Image (cartoon, rainbow, N blue to C red):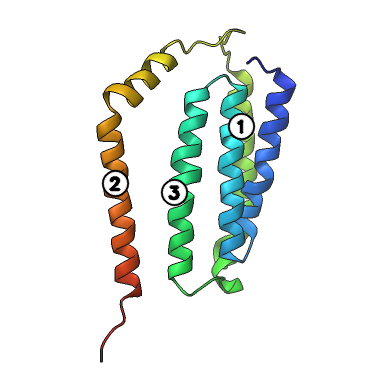
C-alpha cells in the first residue's frame, strides 16, 4: 500500500500528542494509556513508510508486551500518581531551553542532510524475514514467549505473596 507524504506528516504529528501526554500526565495509568497510543502511532508511521514487518513488531512487542508489563507494574505497586515535586524538581527550569536547543540542532542537521529515498519500498527481505521467523524459527519464538509469560506469572506471585510476621 502506497501512502503519500502528507499522510506520513499528519500521522507523525499526531504521534506527538500522546507522547507529550505520556510525560506530562500525573496519573500513571493515564500515562501508560498515552504510551500505548504513542506506540500505536509509531506503528502507523511504520505502515506509512511501507515497513509492515516493523509495524507488526511494534504492535506485538511494544503495544502488546511492554505496555502490559508496565501496566502490571503500576497495578502491583499501590502508587498510582506522584507528587508534584517528583515531576517538577530544581532542574526543570533548564529542560525547556535544552529541548529547544536540541530541536534547533536536529532541525539544522536533518535540514542539511540529503536523503536518497525513492518512491518504491526498499525492503524486499520483509517476506523472507517473516517467513523465516514464523516458519523455521517459530518454536524458539514461542518458547521465548512462554519464558516471558512464566516470568510475569512469577513476578505476580512474588508481589502478591502475603508476608508473615
- Position of 118 with respect to 124 (left or right) is right
Q: Nearer the viewer, residue 50 or 98?
A: 50
Query: Which residue occupies 41% across, 13% down?
Result: 125
Task: Give percent across and percent down for residue 30.
Answer: 62, 60
Q: Nearer the viewer, residue 79 or 60?
A: 60
Do we see residue 57 in this rendering?
yes
Query: Which residue occupies 45% across, 33% down?
Result: 57
Disc assigned to residue 66? 3
Q: Mark 1 Cα within 10 Å, few/some/many (few <14, many 20+)?
A: many
Question: Quarter of the image containing the N terminus?
Answer: top right
Q: Mark 2 Cα within 10 Å, few/some/many (few <14, many 20+)?
A: few
Q: Mark 3 Cα within 10 Å, few/some/many (few <14, many 20+)?
A: some
Q: Nearer the viewer, residue 85 or 143?
A: 143
- Name the N-terminal-most of marks 3 and 2: 3
Mark 3–mark 2 Cα distance, whole angstroms, equals: 15 Å
Mark 3 vs 2: CB contact within 8 A: no
Q: Secondary structure at mark 3?
A: helix
Residue 124 versus residue 92 in the image, above or below: above
Q: Secondary structure at mark 2?
A: helix
Q: Which residue is mark 2?
A: 146
Residue 158 versus residue 142 in the image, above or below: below
Residue 111 versus residue 120 in the image, above or below: below
Q: Which residue is mark 1?
A: 44
Q: Secondary structure at mark 1?
A: helix
- Name the N-terminal-most of marks 3 and 1: 1
Mark 2–mark 1 Cα distance, whole angstroms, equals: 28 Å
Amino acid at each position: 500500500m502506497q501512502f503519500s507524504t502528507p499522510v506520513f506528516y499528519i500521522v507523525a504529528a499526531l504521534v506527538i500528542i500522546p507522547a507529550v501526554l505520556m510525560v506530562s500526565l500525573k496519573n500513571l495509568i493515564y500515562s501508560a494509556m498515552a504510551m500505548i497510543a504513542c506506540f500505536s502511532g509509531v506503528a502507523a508511521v511504520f505502515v506509512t513508510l511501507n515497513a509492515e514487518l516493523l509495524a507488526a513488531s511494534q504492535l506485538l512487542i511494544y503495544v502488546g508486551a511492554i505496555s502490559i508489563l508496565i501496566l502490571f507494574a503500576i497495578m502491583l505497586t499501590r502508587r498510582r500518581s506522584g507528587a508534584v515535586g517528583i515531576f517538577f524538581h530544581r532542574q526543570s527550569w533548564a529542560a525547556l531551553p535544552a529541548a529547544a536547543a536540541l530541536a534547533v540542532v536536529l532541525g539544522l542537521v536533518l535540514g542539511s542532510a540529503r536523503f536518497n529515498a525513492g518512491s518504491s519500498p526498499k525492503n524486499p527481505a520483509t517476506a523472507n524475514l517473516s517467513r523465516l521467523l514464523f516458519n523455521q524459527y517459530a518454536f524458539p519464538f514461542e518458547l521465548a514467549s512462554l519464558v516471558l509469560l512464566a516470568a510475569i506469572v512469577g513476578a505476580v506471585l512474588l508481589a502478591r505473596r502475603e508476608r508473615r510476621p
